[in-house]
Amino acid sequence: MTYFNSEFAVSQLNGNKELLCRLLTKFNTDYANAPQDMQKKCANSQFDSASLLVHTIKGVAGNLGMLHLYEHAKMLEPKCKEGQAALSEIKEFGDTLTATIRATQHFIKTEVIPQEALPDDANNAQSLQSLESVLTKNQFIPADKLAQYMQNLTMSAAQKDDLLLAIQQLNYEAALTLLRSAVK
């Protein structure tokens, strides 16, 4: 079963794999806990809220080539709205979501073309300058390249943790602020 049709997703974004990776990363972060959130909402009779969550996931899934997740959400949405979603159905939806996230993570790790704007840096000054350039341009940073940057930067562990978190959350403006303040 195909959980993520990368060719479709890339075509939806006119071939922009960098943007696709950013959107997939945000999707994975934002909806990793969606099944648990749905269970809580349904248990608290917040059926409209649970339905809206499934509806949102359905929209993103349909636009980004996550066909199995889209179909599952399409069936679950009205059941959530009516308060008829069974715990087993929410669990199945969660399993599909988890498999979809796993498939998108695989795409992000293996199929992203390394950025030409990201030269291999050997020292802190070059890493700092290169990372600042990439963040300023809001470019996606593959995990291996981000690890290389973090290794080459001369910052405290706490500063690196804060910077890494900001980058992973795609909050590049905050990451730039942290990066610039760390080198003053």
Image: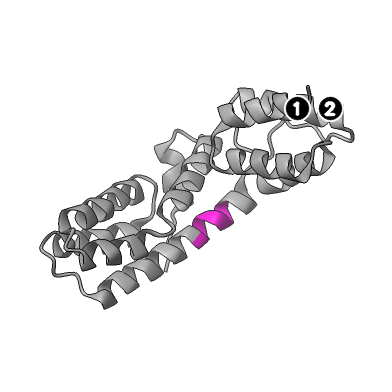
The quadrant where residue 70 appears: bottom left
Q: Amino acid at mark 2?
A: Gln
**Quarter of the image with the C terminus in it:** top right
**What mark, if any, has residue 173 been given in the picture?**
none
Q: Which residue is mark 1?
A: 130
What is the magenta range? 102-107
* Residue drawn where x is 34% and y is 46% of the image: 60
Left of 85 or right of it: where is 98? right
Compared to 127, does 1 lie above or below? below
Residue 105: in magenta span: yes
Whether residue 26 is visible? yes
Q: Which residue is mark 2?
A: 126
Whether residue 117 is visible? no
Residue 44, percent from left and from top? 21, 64
Residue 19, percent from left and from top? 51, 35
Residue 100, percent from left and from top? 44, 61
Left of 29 or right of it: where is 148? right
Q: Are marks 2 and 1 in contact (CB under 8 Å)?
A: yes
The quadrant where residue 77 appears: bottom left
Query: Element type at marker 2?
Result: helix
Instruction: Tell me how many marks there are.
Output: 2
**Quarter of the image with the N terminus in it:** bottom left
Q: Spatial distance from mark 2 to mark 1, Cα to Cα?
A: 6 Å
Q: Amino acid at mark 1?
A: Ser
* Residue drawn where x is 66% and y is 30% of the image: 178
* Residue drawn where x is 67% and y is 47% of the image: 143
